[in-house]
Image (cartoon, grey):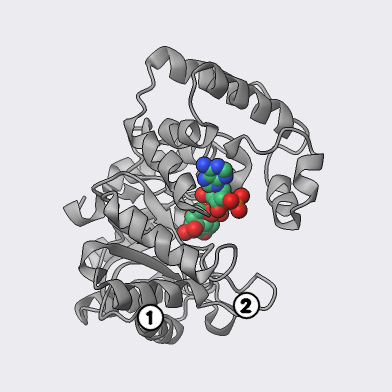
Amino acid sequence: MPPALVPRVRIVLGCNVFGWRVTDAEAMRILDAYVDAGGTMLDTADQYTAAAPGLSGGESEDTIGRWCARSGRRDQVVIGTKVGLMPQRWGLRAANIERAAEDSLRRLRTDHLDVYYAHADEVQVPIAEISAAFDALVQAGKVRYAGISNVSVTRAEQWLAWSGEHEEAVPMALQPHYNLLHREPFEREWAHVAERHGLAVYPYFALASGLLTGKYTVPEDLEADGFRVQVARRYLARDLFHVLNGLRAWAKEHDVEMATLALAWLLHHPRVTAPITSVSSPMQLEAALAATRLSLTEDELAELHGLTLSA
Ligand SMILES: NC(=O)c1ccc[n+]([C@@H]2O[C@H](COP(=O)([O-])OP(=O)(O)OC[C@H]3O[C@@H](n4cnc5c(N)ncnc54)[C@H](OP(=O)(O)O)[C@@H]3O)[C@@H](O)[C@H]2O)c1
């Protein structure tokens, strides 16, 4: 795995909340605090956050771009962004990938994207076309590494094989959905794909979009936040709160914040390079970074596995 893909502090700062759930001033403070603490990797997408009322996408990249320009710290961070889900630049046709990359470069105010992910698949597009489009960006120096997210294992394997055989840019990074509430298909499938191909692995929804923070103990806690209600539907609908409260009790007993515990658990998986998490404040950032200092024993990991599987 290229050394540039291993962040110095093993927490990737997710930036999908910028321009949406945190103010511009807070975003600048969070970015400064993250880099001050030794953080080196930011994750965004052209699409963030088109789904939010009143926004159209590009807001997150634009915030990062302004922070880079204002702070002069662009060369201190590795920036990952994505193509495929922004409504105005949807899909993985070669022409779209090329234009979307130009848009991201402009918003990020940079001359290269360190990691450029396919955010989701467009299965009608042949792998040869996708691979060639990413390779052209790498050859032009506009992208350092290609990455994969939300693509089937079959198509990912095809892309990895095709690019290798045709001496095109082989994807080097993977973003799977993986956390204490959602262990498969990562453990069954993707961990092995990552090992076979030496991919850097950055799990997203590391805190199940905020559920794994101890803030929600009964379903009513979610009701004040419509976004979180939607998130909760993604997980174990029937037993969600049983699992959350078990983990919360475990965290309390061990005197650790639940968010710290959830991230530390991910960091103990041998295939995980660094989990991605977003934060709404520098205080939440502290809890995230504390995960890199939390060591869990084999017995503790087994207890936690038991809690996630007991649902
Ligand atoms: N590849 C993909 O398809 C994909 C998909 C989704 C996300 N992502 C990436 O992954 C990143 C993270 O995703 P995410 O933001 O949805 O989920 P997350 O990291 O699982 O959840 C983060 C949210 O939890 C809350 N939180 C964090 N630390 C906390 C603490 N210590 N105490 C209490 N609450 C805390 C904050 O929200 P509140 O303060 O508002 O409660 C924060 O925004 C995104 O920014 C994005 O870069 C990638």
Q: In percent of the image, x 65 and y 21: which residue is there?
A: 310
Whole-percent x and y of residue 162? 31, 64
**Mark 1: few/some/many CA within 10 Å (<14, 14-19, 20+):** many
The type of residue carrying mark 2 is Leu
Whole-percent x and y of residue 106? 37, 85
List the residue tagged with mark 1. Answer: 101
- Residue extending furthest toward the top: 299
Please count the marks in the image.
2
Residue 207 showing in the rendered view: no
Whole-percent x and y of residue 116? 35, 68
**Mark 2: few/some/many CA within 10 Å (<14, 14-19, 20+):** some
Asked whether, in this view, residue 281 is left or right of residue 210, the answer is: left
Q: Is residue 114 above or below residue 38?
A: below
Q: Is residue 95 above or below residue 40?
A: below
The type of residue carrying mark 1 is Ala
Q: Closer to the camera, 131 or 6?
A: 6
Q: Quadrant of the C terminus?
A: top right
Q: Could you say whether the residue bearing mark 1 is in a helix, strand or loop? A: helix
Quarter of the image for residue 77 reads: bottom left
Q: In percent of the image, x 62 and y 77: which residue is there?
A: 55
List the residue tagged with mark 2. Answer: 55
Q: Is residue 218 above or below residue 87?
A: above
Q: Closer to the camera, 68 or 176?
A: 68
Which of the two discs, 1 and 2, labels the residue nearer the N terminus? 2
State how far apart marks 1 and 2 are (Cα).
Answer: 20 Å
